[in-house]
Amino acid sequence: MHDISLPAPPAYRGNSPHPLTNRHLWALALALVVACGVFLFWGGGWQSSYILQLRLVKLGGLLCVGASVGVATVLFQTLTNNRILTPAIMGFDALFLLMKTVLVFFSTALSLQFWDNTTVFLGDTAMMIGATMAIFAAVLRRARHDIQLLVLVGVIFGLLFRTITGFLQRLLDPSEFAMLQADMFAQFGGIDRDALTIAATLMGALFIWLAGSHRRLDVLALGRNSAQSLGLRYDRLQLQVLAAIAVLVSVSTALVGPLAFLGLLVSALTHSLMRSHRHGLLLPAAALIACLILVTGQTLFERILNLQSSLAVVIEFCGGLLFLTLLARGKIK
Amino acid sequence: MIDVSHLSYVIADHQILNDITTQLPRNQITALIGPNGAGKSTLLGAIARQLTPSVGEVRIGGENLTQIDPQVLAKRMAIVAQQLHVGSRIRVADLVGFGRWPHSQGRLSAADNAAISDALKRFDLTALHHRFLDELSGGQRQRAFLAMAYTQDTDWLLLDEPLNNLDLKHARSLMAHLRQMVDHGGKSVVVVLHDLNFTLAWADHVVAMRAGQVVFSGPTTEVATSIALSDLYQTEIEVTSLNDRRFALYHR
């Protein structure tokens, strides 16, 4: 006879400690500060204020893109109740490029050449929010529980958006086409300073809103039935979150172009590190992890590999590999 | 009292609910019974405002349901749906804690934590409280959602087939909890039941539905007869009693 005595489970002691007491978040923040320092000063940053200034702009871009991709992915996964879809997989950034192309296509009529960068950027973002609400609000409402259908819709939408974009671009004259070209591929080299300022402002406003409503997002993640029974105005919050995702995707796509799999990589790492459902922890962790990946990756590429390849390519390769692994292991739910 | 009047619900040309008028009494256990596809879940969903009826209205304590602020309503009425799916990885205690959301908006006080602890104990979840929801069996998960609704501490509790997945012991203990909440806590419970024996044993009031309409309703002892039930389910059912308890025999 073996005496089998299981260890007593820990007693229930109440929950939800404050996010600022979480040691994982502090460790991530510290790692990011170190990574930023290395990026700025390794290889002569302290000798020349010119180099430092260039690097600061680039660093700002990386941090903006990282934070927006990380947060957008977590928000989207909360909205769709799954762990494998990201805004990029559902064709959000293809939609942004389409909206931008449409804007350029009608640029003569709109006299776009007289607009300043800020107006163009805000115009792109506003169109993106409108289009996202019109298309995805309806899709999500009908097909939220059907993940296969969502993936299919995403693939088809992405294809449709890209095809229309391609068609419109063929009709553009060469000078108009040149306005677009810079946005079509992910690149961290030439980040525009004006765009960065607006992007940072938009994101700042959005993050303040998120800081105030992260608890409601926890309820949103329970799904429509439970959330409504708890008194959450589910449909309204769903639209607000969708608009927030549209803004974040606009920011990152406008700054560096489409990045399909970074979001997936970040959300997988975030969930395995934090093991929590609380957005007060998940959102900052996702933002920090995405920034850490981008800053570290860019440092390695610039200083060690001497720009032999592109950071975007490697991130997409790792992210794509992870996507296939998750698919193969049946982790789609 | 919940007053349902002339309620209809149409989805894609299918009349799911057809001009339903009925009353659900306060401070009783009401069982919604009837064959598959009768519209029981839809009626429950309409009462809980999870779907908007095409025609008709629901009043709770005389107030029109659509006029009540969702946050206020969440303190008066809780529903546990039939399909329970949560995408995020969440622990049992955290899920149960969400029941306090209407009262504390996510900032749990000591009183909230005491209520959570009590619900965990009542639904036999204390040993499981640290487990993730996706590591539980169907019945355990069901109990976690029931505990969440219990923690919400509302006047009305609506349960859609809560006995699904539950073993004998937990099914009986759930019904006993409901009985106690009604008799000693002043609560009112509406529950969709498939097991006629549980209906006869625990429900004070019965609303029987078929094809989107109410066939009969009233106090269980009066209306749940052999003839009425046989007609409702279109199969032979004999209601009999043994030691002052009523049973439905339909097994062979």
Image: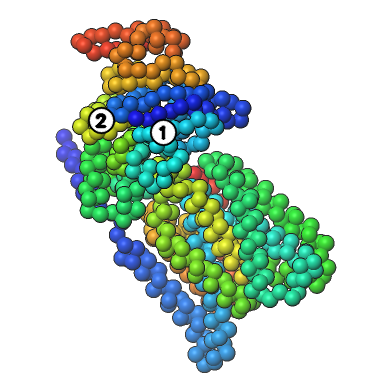
For the residue pair B10 and B128, the one nearer the viewer reads as B10
For the residue pair B189 and A170, the one nearer the viewer reads as B189
Residue located farthest toward the bottom when viewing the structure as drawn:
A47
Picture quadrant where residue B68 is located = top left
Residue at 47% x, 18% y is B210
Q: Residue B59 carries which label?
A: 1
Residue A197 vs B213, above or below: the answer is below
**Element type where label 1 sits in the image:** strand
Task: Give the image's coloring scheme.
Answer: rainbow
Residue A293 in view of the camera: no
Q: Earlier in the sequence, mark 2 or mark 1?
A: 1
Q: Looking at numbered disc 1 in the image, what kind of residue is underneath it? A: Arg
Picture quadrant where residue B64 is located = top left
Residue at 67% x, 48% y is A156
Residue at 66% x, 57% y is A95
* Crowd class of label 2 (few under 14; some 14 to 19; many from 20; radius 10 Å): some
Residue A203 falls left or right of residue A95: left
The picture places residue A188, in percent across and down from the top left corner, at 61, 73
Residue B119 falls left or right of residue B37: left
Residue A255 vs B239, above or below: the answer is below
Do tags 2 and 1 sit on the same chain?
yes
**Element type where label 2 sits in the image:** helix
Residue indicated by mark 2? B182
Residue at 56% x, 63% y is A248
C-alpha distance separating marks 2 and 1: 20 Å
* Crowd class of label 1 (few under 14; some 14 to 19; many from 20; radius 10 Å): some
Count of numbered tags: 2
Q: Looking at numbered disc 2 in the image, what kind of residue is underneath it? A: Val
Q: Numbered disc 2: what chain?
A: B
Marks 2, 1: nearer the viewer: 1
Q: Numbered disc 1: what chain?
A: B
